[in-house]
Amino acid sequence: MARLHKLQRLLLRDNQLTGPLPAELGSMLALKDLYFDVNKFEGAIPLEWCNLIKSVNSKKLLDVNIVTPASNPSLCGPVPECLVKQGKLRTANVVGTFLQVDDSVDNPGRVQGVCDLTPAVCRAEEGCGIRSETVIASLQEFSFEFPECSDPDSGMRSYYWGIDMCDDETSCHDRDDAMAFTALTAFSYKTSDGLTMYRQQYKANGLALINGGWYKILLKGYNGAGPPLSTTISSRPFLVDSTPPLPSTIYDSQFCKEEDTARVDEVLEACWSDFVEAESSVVRYEYRVHKRRRDGESSEAVGEWKSVNKTAYTARTGRYAVSESGYRLEDGWVYFYEVRATNAAGLKSSSSSRGVLYSPTNQRLLLAIILSVIIPVVLLGCLGGWAYKRMEHYYQHVEQQERRRKHQMDSMKEIYDVLAFMPLPITGQVVPRLEVIGEEKEESEDGDETSDTASSLMDQRAEAVFTAENVTFVITDMESSTLLAETNPALFREILEIHDALVRQLVDEYSGYEVMSQGDSFELAFVEPSLAVCFCNALQTRLMKHEWDKRVLGLSGCEEMYDEHER
């Protein structure tokens, strides 16, 4: 086309032409009109086009007419000075390009840019990434900082940032679905090494992060190219934890048991299980000792906060145990521990033990008693110990046999009295047994067959117990039930329902008979001792193997038991 030396008018508009503007058009010396708008040309206007001005005096030699922003949006760089001075390029017709020319009057606010084909980069010596907390405590406020990005060709134009949701610590979406990209309002500062850092502090307006959710920050840095090119960097996923740890019970002993509330020595002990942290984790435990008067409510610390080291933790039991000595304890004062837990977000919670009463007077009194009374008694006892033990053993054996026979006779009398009355299945009223049997026979003609079968089975078991020669009685009672009920009544009712269901299920399996029940206590009868023994063993095994809720195991009075294999 450049060989068409006589061509005067060239219209290339609206052809979707791509690539750089051809410099060869500068050799078409007869050219008077040139239109190339509504295309996809890129790059700068060639300097060779200045040749057209030197050879022709047309008033409209060159007319760059860009109609819409979608036309030639990749034209960039400075316009040749020759075209600007001669007025051959109308500034009103550069709309939609990034050509660099003074058009502030015709196109106020138009973005200009140099021709730069490479995006900005983040300086490797500054960390190359966004720095933020791994766990944050607020649902609406957080901050982050990042090193300045750079572009040696076109410089940096602007920064935008957004928030991306993550499924967990390793899986994120990279689509700013928590908060769309918005202009950065960060302030910059210089490090001691002279590096520029930006710090963004954000307080959400309408945005609330979710407690327990994972997020990461996305940042886009745009250079000064036309059109601007961006570089995207991101932070590591961070967790939102806005709640402190849930405290556990603190005990005044190294074995997590409530012991005597008085001490005669000067050693103070404490034990506790892990505080519950559902979102992040507990990163630090601290403790200190307090004291209060025996009848007072206010307390004061007698020591500083101390960190709990790893040796205080026992992995087998999942418990921490600490002890302190060397304090000047005062007679009649109560000493207790305060334990504080800090989670990964920096939130803290604390719990205190009940405390122990320091009473060294008891120790001195005890020593006086030992010196004046117990030692002489022990010496005298040693002189006649052998004869006394033999006689005591004999009388204990006789008395035990007598009590056993009396208890068996009393138990037989009670079961005979109880078997004369049977509980109605529906109303629970107690009536003579013969009347119940009579009513069941009348209702069996029209009543439910399952109810008759159950009543018949109960009659058979009662008859078997009544006629058995070696009736065995079993009385069950739940240990520490009163303490459990006072600590958490609602949770104790759940425990009681599980306990009662297991007892009645095993009574049926081992052909036993429920004489009566009251609260958590059962009185049962079996026709053979072996069945009673099997029932007791099965019940204890079922209760121990039941997967109790962690809340149950945390109640006062509950503790884990281990066999000889530490299981």
Image (tube, rainbow, N blue to C red):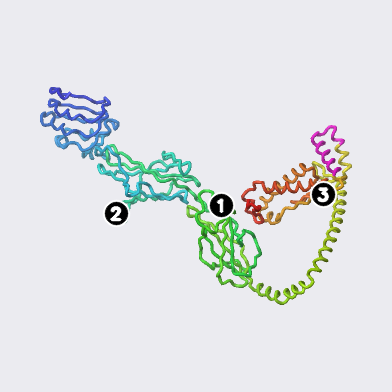
The spot of residue 193 in percent (x, y) is: 30, 55
Q: Determine which residue is flagged by label 3.
A: 472
Disc on the earlier residue, 2 or 3: 2
Q: Are marks 2 and 3 in contact (CB under 8 Å)?
A: no
Disc on the earlier residue, 2 or 1: 2
Residue 418, numbered label = none
Q: Give the spatial CA distance, label 1 vs label 3.
A: 46 Å
Please give the range of residues in magenta.
Answer: 441-464
- Across the whole image, how many numbered discs are drawn on residues? 3
Question: Disc 2 residue type?
Answer: Gly
Q: For the residues carrying marks 2 and 3, which lies nearer the camera in this image?
A: 3
Residue at disc 1, secondary structure? loop
Disc on the earlier residue, 1 or 3: 1
Q: Give the spatial CA distance, label 2 vs label 3.
A: 90 Å
Q: Give the spatial CA distance, label 2 vs label 1.
A: 45 Å
Residue at disc 2, secondary structure? loop
Snapshot quadrant of residue 5: top left
Residue 194, numbered label = 2
The spot of residue 276 in percent (x, y) is: 56, 52
Lateral position of residue 502 relative to residue 188, left or right: right
**Callout 2: 10 Å neighbours few (<14), some, many (20+)?**
few
